[in-house]
Image: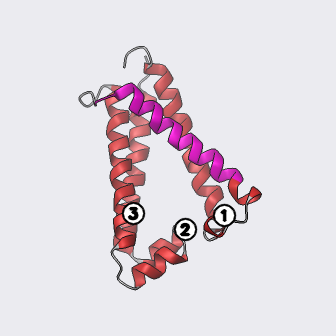
Amino acid sequence: MSVNYLIFAGALSLIASIAHIFIIFGGPKWYRFFGAGEQMAAMAEANSIRPALITGVIALVLGVWAIYAWSGAGIVPEMPLLKLGLVLITGVYLLRGVIGLIAPYISDHPAIMANGKLFWFWSSLICTVYGVIHLVGLVSVWNYV
């Protein structure tokens, strides 16, 4: 049983979580640099709490996902509904990755185009890689979780 993929998957989710926390403290320039969109950056410039709340929730979710991956690897106590959780986490990463890779090329919706094609490409590629690593890890522990 190769749990190394889930250990690595957890580390990747934790890194993403920490990056989101840094974005909150980095302020508008960081929101812009990481492609959150001009609306989020402008709200941060106006001292709105909304960007921090949204980004904080994302960081929290990603942190929980890290714990789920490590739980699947057996290095932290078993989380509730572990198998279902790992399936959903893997699915979200893969779905976000694949949809994000094609969306900017098949839609000119303002919500999609606000971040630009470069943001969608890189963030979607990252999500796809995270999803594949989760999938390999999940498959490797399927009969044990």
Q: Quadrant of residue 59?
A: bottom left
Q: Is residue 130 visible?
A: no
Considering the image in quadrants, where does the N terminus appear? top left
Magenta span main SS: helix
Left or right, residue 38 beside residue 121? left
Q: Which residue is mark 3?
A: 55
Crowding at mark 2 (Cα within 10 Å: few <14, some 14-19, many 20+) = some
Q: Earlier in the sequence, mark 1 or mark 3?
A: 3
Please report the bounds of the magenta region as a residue range: 80-102
Left or right, residue 113 beside residue 93? right
Do residues under tags 1 and 2 come within 8 Å of each other at their CB atoms?
yes
C-alpha gap between disc 3 and disc 2: 12 Å
Crowding at mark 3 (Cα within 10 Å: few <14, some 14-19, many 20+) = many
Nearer to the camera, 10 or 102: 102
Residue drawn at (60%, 47%) of the image: 97
Residue 118's disc number = 1
Q: Quadrant of residue 143?
A: top left
55 to 7, vertically: above or below: below
Q: Which residue is mark 2?
A: 35
- The extreme left residue here reads 77
SS class of the residue under badge 2?
A: loop
Which amino acid type corresponds to the residue marked 2 in the rendered image? Gly
Crowding at mark 1 (Cα within 10 Å: few <14, some 14-19, many 20+) = few
